[in-house]
């Protein structure tokens, strides 16, 4: 039991969709300077848990605690942006909604950092990789303390992956935290301090990354 | 509020980038509006005809000793046309803007002229332009024919009294003056007592012939059929396609179609684009999101509605068409468009929340629009359940608001009533949409 209050915590949080329980009640905390990997097969409940932690979904049971003043950035698995707006317009809109003091400057900075096209063509016309970059860039708006990333590197090239992890690491070093869903075991070893494993909507393992037994993978993905 | 405006601005930008969609959305309802207006005008079995009574017609009137029931005659006419009593000014305006298709004017002194039975009093009928006016023309002719047949008997009876007086002599009245008539019979007797000169014999012959001729006057008078003359004034007022009904239908139908489709589609699109989760996590509440769609619908209704009204106004000005007030009532129309757009937008948002996908939402909205419109076209007095159902939907109230705002002489009572309806329906549908919007997160 750590002293103090975690940045973000699920307290018995679960979610039903109609008659189906996508996530059984989960207790999970995210602390400063921590990188948490969520692993599990497709449909195990990783995205649902991240959505609950992000506040994008309301829990059907339990609740989510967020420390006062903590800002959360979220990049869902499927890019969440307006297809008829350009990358710049998307960034400016969400910068305003996030309360960025200078939305134009924030937008221009993220366009540069994520190497996104600044032209006015709709973002629906972007390549899959660029759309994912835009999706991630939006998550960085509003100077978040916590980043919740759902399979963030799935459509990125190696260079963009490297740059993403650099940014995420910088956040952690600054006292922030991140949680990411992944199917990539190498990413767990390189970037996660802790691992939370889900199976059929239940949390079956939470612990330090080094204690996470790769042999469990076969069971998880069965 | 700021976040709602940000979303509203985003939606306007998205809409601007879909010119083809916008063009189709504009052209389609306008075409439907004209068609629906046409059907509606013919579906109403009773054309609305104004009766301008400048002579204060009494309930009954005695002509030639016979009592006529004016009220019954008017009721008889009401079987074929909807006769509404209006002031000359109101009748002229409503003929001008197409709310009535004809005006029948009973001029001052009509009854007294009729009672004098010396000359034919005149009824004046004014018909609007357009195909339906021929039907009304027939109805008015039938009315005058019916009146003439009733009056014919009284006229003949009265005229025969004069003939009898001329034949037999005695006291009579004419134009209020009493006089003594010698009569042909008494004249003949007087002549017989006189010395029989050629001139006297010629007079006796004339009197004899005149008595024979006047004996057949009754039959001759019965052949007289038209004591009332129908005078047609030159056609005035707007043609049918510019009438109040069509304008109000065009406005109501266009904004109903557009606002329902857009509010439903744009709310559901937030989920399709996977943005709803981003917004709902504290950036924009679901209530604000629904508000943004309602505001979008209201803004769109305002822009389109004013454009349509201005287009009608320009056509009216260019065509030199009289009637209506195409410019002075625009401020009232602004209020109506905002309220109607908002109310319909709330209903659209509810449909979008229930459908959850933009394509399904647009399809559902399209399927819902036509029944809403047709329910609004069914006269409530003929099918009361249809009237109740349409009262629970914004289309009818939007239509009534527009018609009253643009064309009624004293629109305030009707405007307040319809505005309250629109606000109440908007609140109900908006509240339901807010509840339903939770489904978008699933």
Image (cartoon, rainbow, N blue to C red):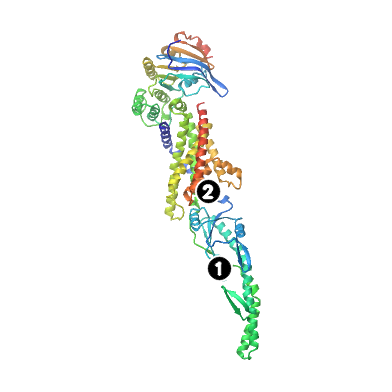
For the C terminus of chain A, the image quarter is top right
Query: For mark 1, what is the residue?
Result: B113
Residue bearing mark 2: B37
Q: Is tag 2's residue or tag 1's residue first in the polypeptide sequence?
A: 2
Give neighbour class at mark 2: few <14, some 14-19, many 20+ (Cα, 10 Å). Answer: many
Give the quarter of the image for residue B161. Answer: bottom right
Residue at (39%, 31%) from the top-left corner?
A121
Side of B135 where B27 appears, left or right: left
Q: Is residue B45 visible?
A: yes
Q: How crowded is mark 1: few (under 14 residues within 10 Å), some or many (20 or more)?
A: some
The image position of residue A170, as x and y in percent, is 36, 16
Circle 1 sits in a helix, a strand or a loop, which is it? Answer: helix
Name the spot of residue B103 as percent of width and height, x first: 53, 58
User: Is the residue A70 above or below the residue B304 in the image?
Assistant: above
Between residues A211 and B287, which one lies in front from this camera angle? B287
**Viewer-proximal residue, A12 or B257?**
A12
Q: Determine the chain carrying the residue at label 2.
A: B
Against B21, is A92 above or below?
Answer: above
């Amino acid at each position: 039991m750590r002293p103090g209050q975690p940045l973000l915590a699920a307290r018995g949080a679960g979610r039903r969709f109609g008659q189906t329980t996508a996530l059984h009640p989960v207790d999970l905390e995210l602390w400063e300077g921590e990188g948490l990997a969520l692993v599990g097969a497709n449909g195990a409940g990783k995205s649902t848990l991240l959505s609950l932690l992000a506040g994008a979904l309301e829990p059907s049971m339990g609740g989510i605690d967020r420390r006062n003043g903590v800002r959360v950035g979220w990049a869902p698995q499927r890019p969440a942006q307006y297809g008829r707006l350009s990358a710049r317009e998307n960034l400016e809109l969400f910068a305003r909604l996030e309360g960025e003091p200078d939305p134009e400057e924030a937008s221009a900075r993220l366009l540069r950092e994520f190497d996104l096209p600044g032209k006015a063509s709709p973002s629906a016309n972007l390549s899959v990789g660029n759309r994912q970059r835009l999706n991630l860039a939006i998550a960085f708006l509003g100077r978040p303390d916590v980043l919740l990333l759902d399979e963030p590197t799935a459509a990125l090239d190696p260079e963009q992956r490297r740059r993403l992890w650099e940014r995420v690491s910088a956040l952690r070093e600054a006292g922030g935290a991140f949680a990411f869903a992944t199917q990539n075991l190498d990413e767990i070893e390189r970037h996660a301090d802790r691992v939370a494993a889900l199976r059929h909507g239940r949390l079956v393992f939470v612990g330090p990354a080094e204690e996470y037994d790769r042999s469990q993978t076969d069971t998880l993905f069965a | 509020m700021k976040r709602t405006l940000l979303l509203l601005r985003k939606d306007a930008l998205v809409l601007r980038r879909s010119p083809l969609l916008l063009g189709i959305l504009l052209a389609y309802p306008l075409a439907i509006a004209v068609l629906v207006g046409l059907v509606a005008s013919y579906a109403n079995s009773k054309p609305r005809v104004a009766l301008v009574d400048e002579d204060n017609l009494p309930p009954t009137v005695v002509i030639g000793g016979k009592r006529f029931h004016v009220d019954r005659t008017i009721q008889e006419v009401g079987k074929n046309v909807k006769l509404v009593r209006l002031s000359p000014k109101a009748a002229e305006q409503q003929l001008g803007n197409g709310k009535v298709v004809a005006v029948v004017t009973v001029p001052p002194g009509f009854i007294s002229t009729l009672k004098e039975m010396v000359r034919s009093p005149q009824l004046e009928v004014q018909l609007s332009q357009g195909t339906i006016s021929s039907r009304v023309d027939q109805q008015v002719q039938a009315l005058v024919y019916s009146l003439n047949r009733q009056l014919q008997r009284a006229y003949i009876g009265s005229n025969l009294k004069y003939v009898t007086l001329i034949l037999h002599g005695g006291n009579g009245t004419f134009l209020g003056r009493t006089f003594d008539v010698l009569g042909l019979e008494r004249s003949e007797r007087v002549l017989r007592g006189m010395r029989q000169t050629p001139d006297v014999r010629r007079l006796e012959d004339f009197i004899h012939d005149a008595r024979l001729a006047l004996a057949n006057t009754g039959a001759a008078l019965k052949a007289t059929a038209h004591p009332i003359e129908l005078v047609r004034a030159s056609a005035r007022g707007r043609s049918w396609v510019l009438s109040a009904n069509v304008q109000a239908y065009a406005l109501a139908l266009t904004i109903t179609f557009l606002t329902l489709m857009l509010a439903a589609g744009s709310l559901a699109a937030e989920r399709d684009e996977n943005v709803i989760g981003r917004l709902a996590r504290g950036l924009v509440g679901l209530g604000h999101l629904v508000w943004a769609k309602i505001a979008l619908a209201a803004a769109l209704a305002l822009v389109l509605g004013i454009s349509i009204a201005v287009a009608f106004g320009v056509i009216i000005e260019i065509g030199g068409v009289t009637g209506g007030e195409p410019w002075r009532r625009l401020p009232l129309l602004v209020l109506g468009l905002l309220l109607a757009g908002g109310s319909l937008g709330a209903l659209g948002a509810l449909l979008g929340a229930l459908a959850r996908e933009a394509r399904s939402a647009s399809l559902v909205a399209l399927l819902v629009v036509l029944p809403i419109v047709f329910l609004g076209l069914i006269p409530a007095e003929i099918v009361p359940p249809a009237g109740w159902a349409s009262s629970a939907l914004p289309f009818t109230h939007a239509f009534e608001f527009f018609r009253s705002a643009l064309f009624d002489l004293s629109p305030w009572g009707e405007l307040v009533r319809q505005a309250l309806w629109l606000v109440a329906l908007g609140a109900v549908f908006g509240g339901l949409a807010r509840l339903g919007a939770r489904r978008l997160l699933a």
